[in-house]
Amino acid sequence: MRIFRSSFPEGFVFGAATAAYQIEGASFGGAGSCHWDTFAATPGNVLRAEDGARACDHYHRWPEDLDLVRDGGFDAYRFSTSWARVMPEGRGAPNQEALDFYDRLVDGMLERGLKPYHTLYHWDLPSALADLGGWTNADSPKWFGDYAEVISGRIGDRVASTATINEPWCVAWLSHFLGHHAPGLRDIRAAARAMHHILLAHAEAMERLRGLGLGNLGIVLNFTPAEPASDTPADLAATARQDAIANRWFIEAIAKGSYPEEALEGMAPHLPEGWQDDLGRISAPIDWLGVNYYTRGLIQQGEGPWPQISDAEGRRAKTQMGWEIYPEGLSGLLQRLSREFVGDLPLYVTENGMAWNDRIENGACFDPERIDYIDRHLSAALAALDCGANLKGFFYWSLLDNFEWAFGYERRFGLIHVDFDTFARTPKASYHELRSALGK
């Protein structure tokens, strides 16, 4: 690698990230059913019909995993807590075994000198709440606020920061309009309501956590910079709509208290009554913004009803996910966010990484493609810093190969190879290279 810790300002945070459902094992420790369990149990939804029942068995192997974070030279560990584990019915009495588990997990980070970066929600909605409509239900923000209070009341005094929601676009649009993730809906009314209610849930949690006296609160948004496949008016208009839905909807609501007109032209008729009155709560100040970036989108005019958006074939080398490797998009995104939306608000790259068809050979995993990917994206982050973005940290996704949602266990993003039969952990060459770059 050409980029080292010394390339960044003193105090810059380097970390690795995971998510509860993807690594813990949902069948352990009294966790309740979540909508990913039932989505995965439905034929055709998840590759090879795999689920998160065992995942990486992090629930039992967390000390080993935290040792790997520490020994990798990282400063911080970004983790999520499972709503369905903490409150198996989504509401009511919490699962004490879960609270004790997360207590031990946070203490384990601190004992290893790691800063805990907590995410409240990384997509594991309790099935009992899905039965009531999940994020389409107007009561969902209150349900989420109750959960946020319970878990933060237990571990909030020891975490370095708390994010309310991870990737609300995936929670709402990808899952309720495109139907790729749980609950697998393809309904514009459901999508519009989820797009609004997930932001209200963020606002509710912010208010509850402020009420507990907690600070350093933010949200994690995913961005896919939209570029037109051509300069035709139709492709330019489709790109503007895609940018409004995928990139501007959430950050504009939080930073400016408004929704973009290009998205409202299709969603306004389906939003809940009085949605405009909620934007004041949604735009309450945050302390930092998490930025998840993987690739860009090349957009062209699509067919059918609104939004008439179609993806064009990218021209660059691609990851195992089929995503273009486009590091300069990260630099441009961070600069755009600073320039147009958040000013000097602290930014963190909370996810960036690549899936590859990694194999163990002679007891080792050689992944030069990932080493190059990390190096080029760290260079892009550094370029944004040099252009004035107030970037404070960078978290690689993911620490471990894990349950990659609709792609099951086939797509491997980890710095650590996981054998899903034995759960053996094998640090890849990228782990060792990044460890060296971080000065460990």
Image (spheres, helix red, strand yellow):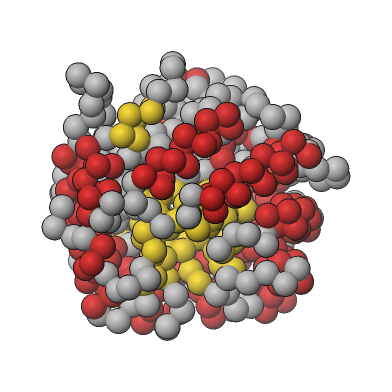
Query: Which sits in the foreground, 384 or 193?
Result: 384
Res 115 seen here: yes
- In this rendering, position of residue 123 left or right of residue 299: right
Q: Residue at x 44, y 28 (%)?
A: 408
* Residue 371 position in % (x across, y down): 20, 45
Numbered marks: total: 0
Q: Residue furthest top?
A: 421
* 36 left or right of 393 in image: right
Q: Is 383 or 436 nearer to us in this picture? A: 436
How far from the left and from the top, in percent, is residue 336? 34, 75
Find residue 26 and report its image quarter: top right
Q: Quadrant of residue 226?
A: bottom left
| In this rendering, position of residue 437 left or right of residue 168 | left
Residue 191 horizontal/vertical position (percent): 59, 52
Q: Is residue 92 above or below residue 393?
A: above
Q: Residue at x 54, y 50 (%)?
A: 111
Residue 393 figure quarter = bottom left
Along the viewing direction, whichever of 235 and 404 lies nearer the viewer: 404
Residue 248 placement, left or right of 4: right
Name the residue at 49% across, 29% down.
56
How far across and down, in percent of the image, does residue 367 sit?
20, 36
Residue name at image x 59 percent, y 44 percent: 105
Q: Please, which residue is most extreme toward the right here?
A: 92
The answer to whether residue 238 of the structure is visible from this angle is no
